Image (tube, helix red, strand yellow):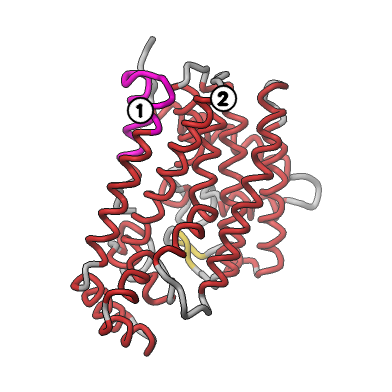
Amino acid sequence: MPAIERSDLQQAIEADLQAVVRQADGPGLAELHSMLRYHLGWEGEGAGPRATGKRVRPLLVLLACDAAGGDWQAALPAASGVELLHNFSLIHDDIQDNSATRRGRPTLWARWGEAQAINAGDALFALAHLALQRLDAEAYAQAAQLLPQTSLQLTQGQYMDLAYETRTDLQLKDYWPMVRGKTAVLMGACARLGALVAGAGDSALTAYSQFGIQLGLAFQAHDDILGAWGDEAETGKSAHSDLLSGKKSLPVLYGLEHSADFKQRWDAGVSNEAQASELAAVLQDAGARDYAESQVQRLTSEALEALAQTGVGEEASTELRALAQELVGRSW
């Protein structure tokens, strides 16, 4: 059997997503369709690979299906479903976080206003569920339960994230339930959906879910590292975006618990890039970056251990393991 080509998967994902999104078009709806296409990176100034993003979640669906012995093309409806659900959440998150830029371009609300952006996000939510209807009956019955459950967990994680903004009593242990809901459960659903389409048994499905969840936690922890010490040219955001926005990320929570100097500076507020740069240096000296990187390594190891419990051999899961390593070593 020929090795799976990542480029083939990415082309198929884009074609399937575009077909699903066309359902939002119709008489008098050209602008709505254009808004969705803009957000997904297909049109407007700066359109292209950087604007579309890496399509991590649909790739995870297809690679899990392939690893579990299925036909990845049969999993395309699930891949589109999770990517559209993810992008629904991004549109709403950008509004809630007052983020005017994503991937180097103005966000949807910054261009069309909050009301239309909320409506566009709702359209993607509906399209995500419609996409699943093309799965075979058995897979659809389970996927149609999993996606709403995951959606609820996403909103619970976002609730915690927003609530944390005004809390002053947070500890490191509070971080993990929040990012589990905000990021990890969707990654777990992606891996489970791919294996589900392939016809994997219950124990394997559980292992795939755990693989995705642990990978999602590692992915978010690494994202928090980039949010404090990232390269603006790679991330499309300020090098210290999380520090400027006041986000209580993993490194920040570590710093608040372990560095009186950092806590004093943090409590005083960060108003410009120079202050954020100084704060990032204090945070690094306090050991926050080393701690966060150790958590990424631990969670990645746990993810790969869960993948080994699926029962598939190393050759079958080569691309899935490669994706996992790529996600926790990225600079974007």
Kind of residue at badge 1: Glu
Do callouts 2 and 1 mark residues in contact (Cβ within 8 Å)? no
Kind of residue at badge 2: Asp
In the rendered image, residue 324 lying in the magenta stretch gets the answer: yes
* Image vertical order of residue 200 relative to residue 235, above or below: above
Q: In which quarter of the image is the N terminus?
A: top left
The foreground one among 277 and 150 is: 150
Residue placed furthest toward the top? 1
| Residue 296, percent from left and from top | 31, 51
| Residue 263, percent from left and from top | 33, 82
Q: In which quarter of the image is residue 162?
A: bottom right
Q: Give the range drawn in magenta.
A: 306-325
Res. 319 mark:
1
* Image vertical order of residue 322 relative to residue 30, above or below: above
In the rendered image, residue 75 lying in the magenta stretch gets the answer: no
Helix or strand or loop: what does disc 1 sit on?
helix
Q: Distance between the residues labelled 2 and 1?
A: 22 Å
Helix or strand or loop: what does disc 2 sit on?
helix
Give the residue pinned by disc 2.
202
Q: Is residue 30 left or right of residue 94?
A: right
